[in-house]
Image (spheres, rainbow, N blue to C red):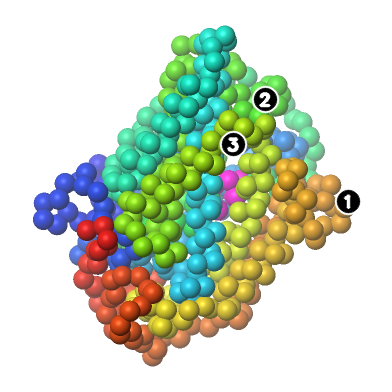
């Protein structure tokens, strides 16, 4: 299925009024996207979700899935279920952007209140910066392994530093330019990654094995599902609307969900299965992947492919990081930071440099802190996802009060106690039902398990993810009701205010789901970045 080149870039790009170059820095921040500035088709969403998920590191993640011990077939099915369903959630959340016209963490204010939304916004920021850090660390570890393979006597640290900085600088540069450039770059990278992945799979194919090992258990099966869900879709759902908000409201809703799901999950399902089979065929590689997941995958590669492999690994993490940097910058604005969007990207890059520098050059292992990161952030993100999607469903007829999304005195108020309370309660329960191997984080988790359950298969089942999502969604659905925003129109406050700038007129509303367009809003530009 081929999309026209224009679709890949125009699916979510700002309009080029005044003859602006397609490579000009995007100035829009949190502002509402007017109907006149929307263009493209849902097919264009394939590229931004495919590129960061065609990554050789996913083969190593397949080995982690194999460690649950349910056998290669059960592990493959469970990994596929977790990956696909988690990206269905991303696709559903993308509808809020396509029909709402604002970033995810602005729409989220309807469920949590203008200031109450800062709780999930801070969480979302930590998740995005955390994934940026993971990408920088893994590329650095890959550089170390490749250098030592080529010249065992060399000091790898200079090359590691250069690789680490390359990922940060490269992703920051594209992130500063903004969404229209991201879409173009991701299309090119998707094509390159597909070719290099094919070469890698062919070279490694002799090492895989279909031998049956382990025994099936529902707890282990659920553990793989939860692991895959936290690894993929749940790490993206909090920024899904950021990449669909320039699509026309008349675009197919099924297309938005379908292309997002297909783009994000197709390659991971294949690569996870390959990693599971590789772990069965070569247990030594799986053991080495615990400390150096990217480097372990070079064990049986021919020397001539090591440099292309390293290039592939670095570009893969750049592809993922540019989306995280872009969205984390928008989240920082939603929290209330008064800076141009491009300046927030630079702040994020600085944080990644600090955190990634420690993990890459000082931490003794990778898997334990990585698994702890997935557990700790996956639970509250799952809870937020349940609340956000229920709120989106509740507003399918009445829509959003556009002015209230930017006004703490508006219809959504300062704090929605139902939304914030559901998030906190579901997170507290969920964290008590997950465990971690990390010696520092592990003792703080799983407090609702008995000691036997904590140390058994139930403790590794990631039960807390499912409970947090379901409990948060159910609590919010039962306790929250939506009224027509037309009956509760927000007013524009006079004088100084602590809300976002600029403000739309209060009489204009927009529905998150209906296909009929409502009154368009004049384009709002980020004044600080203009």
| Kind of element beneath mark 3 | helix
Q: Which residue is located at x 58 percent, y 15 percent?
A: 300
Residue situated in front as seen by the camera: 66 or 251: 66
Magenta span includes 232: yes
Callouts 3 and 1 close, C-beta under 8 Å? no
| Kind of element beneath mark 2 | helix
Q: CA distance from mark 2 to mark 1?
A: 29 Å
* Magenta residue span: 228-234
Indicate the position of residue 502 as horizontal and vertical percent values: 28, 71
Quadrant of the frame with the N terminus: top left
| Disc on res. 200 | none
Of the numbered discs 2 and 3, the one sitting upstream in the chain is: 2
Callouts 2 and 3 close, C-beta under 8 Å? no
Q: In this view of the protein, can residue 411 be seen by the observer? A: yes
The residue indicated by pointer 2 is: 288
Callouts 2 and 1 close, C-beta under 8 Å? no
| Kind of element beneath mark 1 | helix
The residue indicated by pointer 3 is: 359
Indicate the position of residue 508 as horizontal and vertical percent values: 29, 80
Residue situated in front as seen by the camera: 455 or 62: 455
Main secondary structure found in the magenta portion = helix
Q: Which residue is located at x 11 percent, y 55 percent?
A: 18
Q: Residues within 10 Å of mark 3 (few under 14, many from 20)?
A: some
Q: CA distance from mark 3 to mark 1?
A: 32 Å
Q: Which residue is located at x 46 percent, y 61 percent?
A: 93
Indicate the position of residue 253 as horizontal and vertical percent values: 38, 62
Q: Which residue is located at x 38 percent, y 53 percent?
A: 344
Magenta span includes 10: no
Of the numbered discs 2 and 1, the one sitting upstream in the chain is: 2
Of the numbered discs 3 and 1, the one sitting upstream in the chain is: 3
């Amino acid at each position: 299925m081929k999309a026209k080149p224009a679709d890949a870039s125009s699916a979510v790009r700002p309009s080029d009024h005044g003859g602006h170059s397609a490579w000009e820095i995007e100035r829009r921040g949190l502002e509402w996207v007017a109907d006149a500035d929307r263009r493209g088709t849902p097919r264009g969403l394939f590229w931004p979700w495919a590129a960061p998920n065609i990554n050789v590191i996913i083969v190593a993640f397949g080995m982690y899935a194999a460690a649950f011990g349910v056998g290669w077939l059960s592990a493959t099915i469970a990994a596929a279920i977790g990956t696909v369903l988690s990206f269905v959630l991303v696709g559903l959340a993308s509808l809020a952007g396509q029909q709402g016209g604002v970033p995810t963490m602005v729409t989220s204010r309807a469920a949590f209140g203008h200031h109450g939304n800062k709780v999930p916004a801070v969480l979302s920021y930590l998740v995005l910066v955390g994934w940026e850090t993971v990408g920088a660390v893994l590329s650095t570890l890959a550089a170390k392994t490749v250098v030592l393979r080529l010249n065992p006597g060399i000091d790898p640290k200079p090359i590691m530093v250069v690789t680490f900085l390359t990922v940060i600088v490269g992703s920051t540069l594209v992130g500063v330019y903004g969404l229209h450039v991201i879409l173009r770059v991701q299309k090119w990278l998707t094509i390159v990654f597909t070719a290099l992945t094919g070469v890698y799979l062919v070279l490694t194919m002799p090492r895989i094995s279909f031998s049956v090992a382990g025994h099936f258990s529902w707890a282990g099966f659920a553990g793989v599902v939860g692991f895959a869900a936290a690894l993929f879709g749940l790490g993206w759902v909090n920024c899904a609307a950021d990449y669909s908000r320039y699509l026309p409201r008349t675009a197919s809703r099924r297309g938005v969900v379908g292309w997002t799901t297909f783009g994000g999950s197709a390659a991971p399902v294949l690569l996870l299965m390959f990693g599971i089979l590789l772990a069965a065929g070569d247990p030594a590689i799986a053991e080495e992947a615990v400390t150096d997941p990217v480097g372990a995958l070079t064990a049986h590669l021919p020397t001539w492919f090591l440099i292309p492999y390293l290039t592939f690994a670095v570009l893969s993490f750049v592809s993922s990081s540019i989306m995280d940097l872009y969205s984390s910058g928008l989240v920082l604005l939603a929290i209330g930071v008064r800076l141009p969007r491009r300046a927030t990207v630079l702040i994020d890059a600085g944080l990644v440099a600090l955190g990634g520098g420690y993990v890459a050059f000082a931490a003794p292992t990778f898997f334990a802190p990585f698994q702890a990161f997935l557990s700790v952030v996956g639970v509250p993100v799952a809870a937020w996802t349940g609340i956000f999607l229920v709120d989106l469903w509740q507003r399918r007829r009445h829509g959003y009060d556009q002015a209230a999304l930017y006004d703490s005195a508006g219809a959504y108020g300062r704090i929605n106690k139902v939304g914030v309370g559901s998030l906190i309660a579901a997170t507290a329960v969920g964290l008590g039902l997950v465990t971690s191997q990390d010696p520092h984080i592990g003792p703080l988790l799983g407090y609702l398990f008995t000691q036997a359950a904590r140390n058994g298969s139930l403790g590794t089942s990631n039960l807390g993810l499912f409970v947090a999502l379901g409990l948060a969604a159910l609590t919010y659905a039962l306790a929250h009701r939506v009224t027509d925003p037309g009956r509760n129109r927000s007013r524009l406050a006079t004088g100084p205010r602590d809300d976002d700038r600029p403000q739309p007129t209060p009489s204009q509303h927009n529905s998150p789901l209906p296909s009929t367009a409502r009154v368009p809003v004049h384009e709002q530009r980020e004044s600080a970045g203009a």
